[in-house]
Amino acid sequence: MLSYQHIYHAGNAADLHKHALLAWVMDYLTAKDKPLSYLETHAGRGLYDLSSDEARKTGEAAAGIGRAEAQNWLADGHPLMRAIGAIRARYGADAYAGSPLIARHFLRKGDSAHLAELHPAEHEALAEVAGHATLYKQDGFAMARSVTPPTPRRGLMLVDPSYEVKSDYAEIPAFIGDIARKWNVGTLILWYPLLSDGRERRMHKKLQGAFPDALTSEVQFPPAKPGHGMVGSGMFTVNPPWGMAEEAARIEGLFRG
């Protein structure tokens, strides 16, 4: 299915949770003078204009990055705010970075990036801002299986599907297991929604059973509108870097405050 476009939801509370942790991990990994690979299975367009009609239609950014900035959740020195500041300096005050551009902010010469996006319009927009990343106009799960283990072997993969395809919930545990076997040193980060009907819980239980040492970070927030099914955000990380658990707990506390 190719109907999902993230511009309607860019900068929302789920993005804030996901991107704050992603930026922290990227900052941690690039602090060491060793090359790395960044892989993303469902990259989107990479750059979003929060003043666009689509973003303004839902107003979800106000409850995410807007709230975080208004309440000073993240200091200017936080990796996410550094990345957003650089994006705004280049693209304007209403620009918001998707995960590919957040990753690009931290990547260095010698690092590699592999980004998959199947939606034609999203892929075209991504190509304009992706820099030297290798782009794939194909299914992101297939890309990941074909690229892993990457060169360099050190690095991370972000798995962030729209979950429009309902079978994703059933198939993702096996996919993560396959990638972990092929790339046992990689940090694998899966984002998933917390839903009012709880359909994601079976997937999460299977993942926990397969990876008992993985890190789970979940935050809850009000639905974007009455009757909306997403009521929170989850991040499941295989091979989390040292210190990520503490940073995740800190971010979770901001949502509860």
Image (spheres, rainbow, N blue to C red):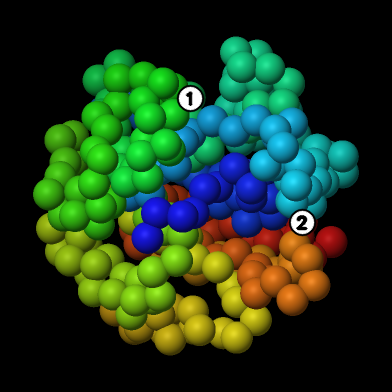
Give the position of the C terminus as an image quadrant.
bottom right
Q: Badge 2: few (under 14), some or many (20 or more) residues near its Cα, within 10 Å?
A: some
In this rendering, position of residue 13 left or right of residue 106: right
Q: Any mark on residue 230, and which?
A: none
Q: Nearer the viewer, residue 247 or 101?
A: 101
**Mark-to-mark CA distance, 2 and 1:** 24 Å
Classify mark 1: residues with Cα within 10 Å, few (<14), some (14-19) or many (20+).
many
Q: Is residue 194 left or right of residue 118?
A: right
* Label at residue 105: 1
Percent of width and height locating residue 80:
61, 35
Residue at the spot 32% in from the left edge and 46% down from the top edge: 118
Above or below 168: residue 126: above
The amino acid type of the residue labelled 2 equals Leu
- Sequence-wise, which precedes: disc 2 or disc 1? 1
Front in this rendered view, residue 58 or 242: 58
Across and down, in percent, residue 41 comes to 32, 49
Amino acid type for the residue under numbered disc 1: His
Q: Nearer the viewer, residue 208 or 127?
A: 127
User: Where's residue 36, x and y in %?
Assistant: 27, 33
- Quarter location, residue 170: bottom left
Q: Decide: marks 2, 1 in contact (CB < 8 A)? A: no
Q: Which residue is mark 2?
A: 254
Identify which residue, 103 or 238, lies in the foreground: 103
